[in-house]
Image (cartoon, rainbow, N blue to C red):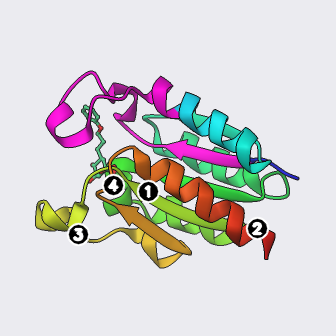
Amino acid sequence: MKPIFVLNGPNLNLLGLRQPEIYGQETLADVVAGLSGLAVELGLAVECMQSNHEGQLVDWIQSARGAAAGIIINPGAYSHTSVAILDALNVFEGVVLEVHISNIHKREAFRHHSFVSGRAEGVIAGFGTEGYLLALRRMASLLKR
Ligand code: CA2
């Protein structure tokens, strides 16, 4: 089975270090450890990557073509701005799930729209960092079909 790419966008390297009232106490390393453990349980493999750079995210999405079964992505602020990330995801043939730690619909109006949501099979928002684990469980059931 090809791996699942878990992509995190800008500033998510600061998880657990700043703004815990919005994004919780867990660090990105904690999230990666949780996903790696759950992946073993589900019989999947995950490759977790984070970048603050839009082009790097586009490069990783392009590299997923033929190499990954699915992509779980939290594009961070690029969710609301990036047609380039949407275009790259549109060329990827596998399952795409979108995760937001916070409930973007309860926040400022500019966060209510995500370009990626038009491509994603499903979107999780407002479940904290647990959303990544829920997305991985959903990915496992979608890939079994
Ligand atoms: O809720 C989410 O997961 C977001 O994708 C997070 C983005 C935000 O721009 C989106 O609207 C919603 C921001 C990520 C910033 O992450 C930080 C984590 C800890 C401390 C500071 C920033």
Spatial CA span between label 4 and label 2: 22 Å
Q: Which residue is mark 2?
A: 143
Q: Earlier in the sequence, mark 1 or mark 3?
A: 1
Spatial CA span between label 1 and label 3: 14 Å
Q: Which amino acid, mark 1?
A: Val
Q: Which residue is mark 1?
A: 99
Task: Using residue 93 as the reference point, say whether residue 30 is left or right of it.
Answer: left
Q: Does mark 1's beta carbon lie closer than 8 Å to ligand 1?
A: yes
Relative image position of residue 50 (x, y in whole percent): 51, 34
Spatial CA span between label 3 and label 2: 29 Å
- Residue sitting at 34 percent across and 34 percent down? 11
- Residue sitting at 73 percent across and 50 percent down? 42
Spatial CA span between label 2 and label 1: 18 Å
Q: Which amino acid, mark 3?
A: His
Q: Secondary structure at mark 3?
A: loop
Q: Which residue is mark 3?
A: 112
